[in-house]
Amino acid sequence: MIYLDNSATTKPNPQVLDSFTKASTGFFGNASSIHGIGMDAERLLRKSREQAASLLEVNPNEIIFTSGGTEGNNLAIKGIALEHQNRGKHIITSAIEHPSVIETCQGLEALGFEVTYLDVDESGLVDIDNLKKEMREDTILVSIMHVNNEIGTIQPIKEIGEVVQSYPKAFFHVDHVQGYGKVPLNIQASHVDLCTISGHKIHGLKGTGVLYVKQTVKLFSLAHGGGQERRIRSGTENVAGIVSLVKAMRLAKEKQSELHKKLTNLKHTLMEQLQTLNRVVINTPKFASAPHIVNFSVRGLKPEVVIHALEDFEIFISTKSACSSKSADESAVLIACGKDRDIAISGLRVSMSYETTKEEVDYFFQKLTEVIKKLSEVMG
Ligand SMILES: Cc1ncc(COP(=O)(O)O)c(C=O)c1O
C-alpha cells in the first residue's frame, strides 16, 4: 500500500499508541477527583500540559486540550466573537480557509457579525496591503491559516501578526493544523493570540488537539460545565488522549528539520516529474509552500476516476476537501486562486509523511502516467 493522503489523516505512530495504552490503563482516574487515583491522573495531565507548552514555547496555562482542528477553530472564532462582540462585530479571514473556519464565520454572519473574506493571489497568498485596507476599528478577529490544506501555500503569519498587533481591539487566530511539524511557526514572535493544532494530522490519534489561547485572552465557552481547561472547555479530560497527543507533538518536532529536507526533495522530484505530463497542471506554488503537499489537475479527467484507478494499484491520494465549495465538483481554493473551471474541477492532492519514500513517489508517478494514458484513450 502506498498512502499519499497524509493531509487527510496520518497513521498513528506506534510510540503514540503505546503511550495511549499505558496512560489509559495506568492513569484512568478522573483528573478532577480528589483521591489518589484522580491525583495521579491530574499529575500526568499537568506534566503533559507543561510538555505541550514547552514544545510550543508558551506557558502551560495557555494550553487548552481539545478534540482536534474543527473544535479548536470553532472555539477560537466563536469564543472571541461571542465574548468580545461589544468591542465590534467585524471578522477578517481568507477565501481559502478550511471549512471549519469558513463555515464558522458563515454561522456568525447569520448571528449578525460581518465577515471579510480576503482574496488571495494565484499562489494562494493573502496580500498584506489588502489586509491593512480591510482592518477597521471594529475588527475583533483575524483568522488566517498557516498552511493551506489543499495546495500547501504558507501564509506570511509574522507579517499578518504585525498588522493585527497594531489594532489593540483585534485578536489573531492561526489554524496551524497543516503546519505543525512541517513548517516552523513561532507563536509569540508572530503575535498570535490563538493557535489550532490537531493530533491526527501528526501521527497522533483522532479526537485529540490543542488550542493555544494567550493568557490575557478571554473566550466565551462553547462547553459549560465542570470548569476544566481554564473554564473554556468543560468536560472530563481525555488524559490518555492528551498524553498520546503530546507524544505525537514531541516526535513531530524532533523530526521536523530532517523531515523538511526529505519531503522538500520528494516534492521537487514529483513536481518535476508531473511537469513532463501533457494534461497535468501543477497547482501547488513552487515557492512559499509546505514540503508535504503537491496539488495538480489532470485536465479533462474526473479526479474521482483517477483516484479509483490508482486505488487498483493500492495507491491512495485524494481530491479537494469535502464540502469546501458551493459547486459540488469545484475546489473553492483553486477558484479563489483564479484557476479556470476545468482545472478547479480536476484537482488532485498528494500528501506525504515521514514514511513516504522516493521509491513510492516514483511508483506513484509511473502508475499515474499509465492511468492518464489509459483514461485519455477511453475518453478521447
Ligand atoms: C487546515 C485544516 N484545519 C482544520 C482541519 C480540521 O481538523 P480535524 O480533522 O482535526 O477536525 C483540517 C483537517 O483537514 C485542516 O486541514
Image (cartoon, helix red, strand yellow):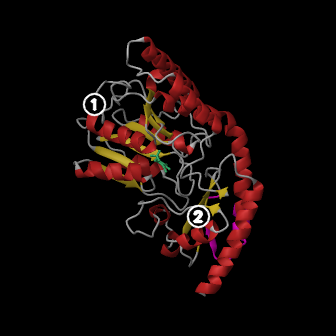
Q: Give the residue displayed 36% in from the left and 32% down from the top.
A: 168
Q: Give the residue displayed 60% in from the left and 87% down from the top.
A: 380
Q: Is residue 320 magenta?
A: no
Can you say whether 110 is above or below 316 in the image?
Answer: above
How packed mark 2 is, by other alpha carbons closer than 10 Å (few <14, some 14-19, many 20 or more), is many
How packed mark 1 is, by other alpha carbons closer than 10 Å (few <14, some 14-19, many 20 or more), is few
**Left or right placement of residue 206 versus residue 376 in this view:** left
Callout 2: SS: loop
Question: Which of the two residues, 291 or 249, is positioned nearer the viewer here?
Answer: 249
Direction front: furthest residue: 25
Eye-nearest disc, 1 or 2: 1
**Left or right placement of residue 322 versus residue 227 in this view:** right
Residue on which the image places disc 1 = 224
- Image location (x, y in percent) of residue 310: 63, 68
Residue 240: tell me if it is visible.
yes
The residues colored magenta run 271-286
Residue type (three-letter) at the residue carrying disc 1: His
Q: Judge: label 2 CB < 8 Å from ligand 1.
A: no
